[in-house]
Amino acid sequence: MTDATSNGPTARAKKEHGSLLVQDALTKRRNASERRFRAYGLTAIGIGVAALILLLTSILSQGLPAFQQTFVTLDVVLDEAKLDKKGNRNIDEIKKVTTFGYAPLIKNGLKSRMEELNISIDGLSDKDAGGIISKEAAGQLRRYVIANPDEIGNSVEFRFLANGRIDGYYKGRVTMQSAERDNNVSPQQLQLADALKDGGALVTRFNWDFITKADASENRPEAAGIGVAIIGSLYMMMIVLVLALPIGVAASIYLEEFAPQNWFTDLIEVNISNLAAVPSIVYGILGLAIFINYGGLPQSAPIVGGLVLTLMTLPTIIIATRASLKSVPPSIRAAALGVGASRMQSVFHHVLPLAMPGILTGTIIGLAQALGETAPLMLIGMVAFVRDFPSAPPEGFFDPASALPVQVYNWTTRADPAFVERASGAIIVLLMFLLCMNMIAIILRRRFERRW
Amino acid sequence: MSLFKLTASTVAIAAVSATAAIARDNVQVAGSSTVLPYASIVAEAFGENFDFPTPVVESGGSSAGLKRFCEGVGENTIDVANASRKIKETEIAACADAGVTDIIEVRIGYDGIVFASDIDGNGFEFTPIQWYKALSDKVVVDGALVDNPYTKWNEVDAALPDQEIAAFIPGTKHGTREVFEDQVILAGCEASGDFDVFKAANGDDTKAAEKACISIRTDGVSTDIDGDYTETLARIESNKDGIGVFGLAFYENNTDKLQVATMSGVVPSTESIATGDYPVSRPLYFYVKRAHVGVIPGLQDYASFFVADEIAGPDGPLAAYGLVSDPELAATQLIVEELKPMSEGM
């Protein structure tokens, strides 16, 4: 807007047209239309920024609580009569006691903690009191006992997750009013939680388990984490990078630098552009038919997911690589050939290093696209409930795993409202990954970019 | 060049280990999204209590699950298919064509289908007749078939509140839709006596009359939900007049947002469904490939753990989540114990 005022009319201006100092009608119109265009541009950016802010605030406000979790600290007596009836510490016999056998120990632990803190709440049955502890606790206790059978008979302090509804109470999702109508939690349980909190036995703190632990069933949303999904996504990205980058770059170099210009290369070119626009679910169908049904690879495994995503990412990488190879000035090639380099030497010593920033950017954008993909994974069995961590690569590539966007999708379909928060939390982690990848792309481009 | 060498060696290692690592040691399950929560609860507890790896559970729908189940025998096919309906004859035939014989059918319990509306809105006491009148494409008025004229519940039945009819029912790909049509709309059609009019209009063809009865109006009063219950819930939250069709378990987990309607005077609960008083329910199943038992470690243990009293019984975690436990669970346990395939078991 300041530009418009700087060339305002002056007193000495004549009425003849053509003066630079007087705005005639045409100039005024041109200036006005430019101002209008700038306003349109600003509005467009404004709408975009507003949408982004809206999206981020909704995700952050819903998802940030997922990184906090409520825990209850209890002293549990590992009763020998229940856990090891014969008392011979035989691990196989200890393993026969299922998690259902451990649940009463936790209830007793809670009872003694309540007595210790002088908590008594009217109308709260023992069963309901035990309900404030996550169902995950019995599994946690059993794992501990199997790992440390010598502790049987002792009293050990544990920090258990609180039930998802109790946790929701401290996050504002559950209130005394809603608890009245809620079948899964009662106001008495919330009172008990408050009393435990006053006594210091219940704390809400940062929850690393959300990032490191595996998914959990609908009975225990508080225990669900994205560990398996992160590893699954990571494995797939490794496979995509290792396969798509060399194949894509080799194909592009050949097409751009060596291939003769004929109908056949034209055909390939058209097909590559077409493939880049094919809906990703098509690659899933392909993956199911080729890799699983024909190739005999296991279902739900990152190797198949990685292969499918490689196919999906290849066209993107090839197109980006070819564009950046094209942007290297022909004079570089001519100079290299002129001093006696072979064509291969000119490509690998001169053209490729100059094209590298473009190639890397294209690859990272392709990877980011692959990271957020769910549709093809649905067909190859990766949209699944997976609890076990895959082992280290390369064997781990063949173990079942989940993926980050899949985890988001899975959680949004679950009945318990606590999963909404966790889905948003997983989105935050996914966005962080994407942000990191794009940052790396920018840094690489800045570092290696050459101008001439 | 070092990048290239690294790449090449990684690919080589992966290729070599591919052959070694392929033997699958986890149970693979797929199928109905209604059974999914139960199956994942069982899978989790199974992984906690046994030395076998936790089974991998996928959803995708009963039909999709059974289709994959029937693809053949081998480690790259699934071991268990979850279904919210009984396997069809055509599916058994497709299975047999692919070499999948000796299918073990396991009924895990029953699922109630409930009608629920926003917690702060009017309460409803429905009968199937009212649902038929509210949603059928054509209804009988003064003895003649006409396009459904009702837009408010009190027009359907003066006993119902003065509220716009806005129904959110499962889309046709869901198994729940079939149950809704058969046990609510068709039952209402027959109970109201209108069925005879439909039959007369369709030239005494019972099949055609049934089809005409259950064809749902398409004038926007009823909305098909192709997603899952979370979508239905979101629709009701945005349209306070809406009434949605839910699974009992979903309602039980969202009692602070939804109020449930009675059907023919009965409040849906695990008890009223188990006794058969509440009329809208269906059995849930899973199917096991007998050929995989003994090949995939833990498959039989998983199946028998699923139907064990402490899991699927009335006090188990599945019932706590909303499954109506099967009074004949002992018979099911026997089927799993003996691995009795369907033809002999039925």
Image (cartoon, grey):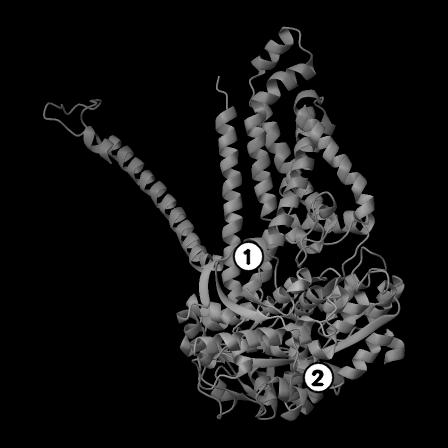
User: B174 above or below A355?
Assistant: below
For this rendering, which residue is in front, B288 or B209? Answer: B288
Residue type at numbered disc 1: Asp
Q: Is residue B236 left or right of residue B204?
A: left
Question: Which quadrant of the figure has residue A324?
Answer: top right
For this rendering, which residue is in front, A246 or B121? Answer: A246
Residue B142 placed where, x, y %? 57, 93
Residue A384 placed where, x, y %? 67, 59
Question: Residue at image x 27%, y 34%?
Answer: A31
Question: Residue at image x 66%, y 69%?
Answer: B41
Residue A161 placed where, x, y %? 53, 65
Q: In the image as oriented, which residue stretches furthest toward the left? A: A11
| Chain on which label 2 sits | B
Report which residue position mark 1 lands on.
A209
Question: Residue at image x 62%, y 80%?
Answer: B113
Visible residue check, residue A417: no
Question: Residue at image x 75%, y 85%?
Answer: B206
Residue A270 placed where, x, y %? 67, 34
For this rendering, which residue is in front, A139 or A279? Answer: A139
The numbered mark at residue B209 is 2
